Amino acid sequence: MSGHSRWSTIKHKKGAADARRGKIWTKLIKEITVAARMGGGDINGNPRLRKAADAARAENMPQDNIQKAIKRGTGELEGVNYEEITYEGTGPGGTLFLVDILTDNRNRSVAEIRKIFEKGGASMGAGGTASWAFDRKGQIKLSKKAASEEQLFDVALGAGGEDIADEGEEWLVTTAGSDVDIVRKALEDAKIEVKNAQLAMIPKNTVNVTGRDADVVVRLVENLDDQDDVQNVWSNFDLSDEELARLSG
């Protein structure tokens, strides 16, 4: 689990549940709308929409909210047209960042993201500044109760999964980016419940950060995450257990 992912998990546990849920729902509604606009409103025939809807249900979003977002995407209800953009940047200690956004105003978004980078001791760069350091992978999360490790090896790896990791309360199955839906379907066909399946940008190598650099990059990720247009923040930084304990204390 990358330093960013580990920190985000702890941050979410510490944060106010209602405030966090509101932020997440806003981001998920945008994703559902765009997925439906691009691939149609049939969840079973649109893998991206299915992932977004599954993620929304995992966050206890009412089905009515999901359906309204789908209808806005397909044009059945009036809605906003969002543009997908990924910004790249560099931070202290050799850290790199990818920031996925959905926006209805590109000029506003680029100005706000650049400002967050600059205030956070980092800088935005041109395309290619950071993307070279990441691989697009599939990530499937399952409850520990859903299956044993042996079952996952048989089903997930048998269907083309690359790795299985113990994440404490969950199993994390990693796949090639193109195989995430194949592996998810194999798990579901085997009656193994999937909590979430998504595409993720995984760093090829991580950079350990400590002390002030750790403070700066964690604050930068938090500020980027909190920006309304930001859907995902990916970074290559890592935190030792000691640093994680200090930051979450």
Image (cartoon, helix red, strand yellow):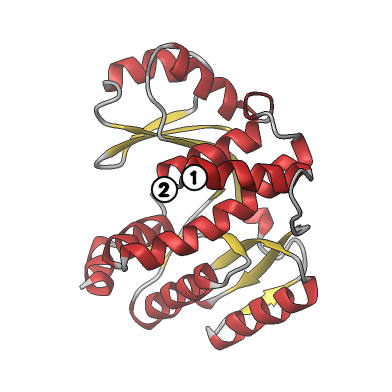
Give x and y (percent) for residue 129. Answer: 71, 65
Residue 141 figure quarter: top left
Name which residue lies at 75% across and 35% down.
39
Q: Could you tell me if the residues under marks 2 and 1 are in contact, i.e. CB atoms within 8 Å? A: yes
Residue type at the position of mark 2: Glu
* Residue 93 visible in the displayed image: yes
Residue at 40% of width from left, 46% of height from top? 60
Q: Quadrant of the C terminus?
A: bottom left
Task: Identify which amino acid the numbered label 1 is placed on.
Answer: Ala
Q: Position of residue 185 (x, y in %)?
A: 52, 19
Residue drawn at x 50%, y 37% as measured from the top left: 54
Look at the picture and state if 219 lies above or below 9: below
Q: Which of 214 and 108 is in front in this view?
A: 108
Quarter occupied by residue 94: bottom right
The residue tagged 1 is 56
Local SS, label 1: helix
Q: Name the residue under label 2.
A: 59
Residue 200 visible in this rendered orientation of the protein: no
Q: At x 48% / y 58%, what residue is drawn?
A: 24
Which structural element holds mark 2? Answer: loop
In the image, residue 120 sits, relative to residue 238, either above or below, namely below
Q: Relative to the observer, which residue lies in front, 74 or 208? A: 74
* Residue neighbourhood size for the residue with mark 2, other residues' Cα within 10 Å, grouped as few (<14), some (14–19), many (≥20): few
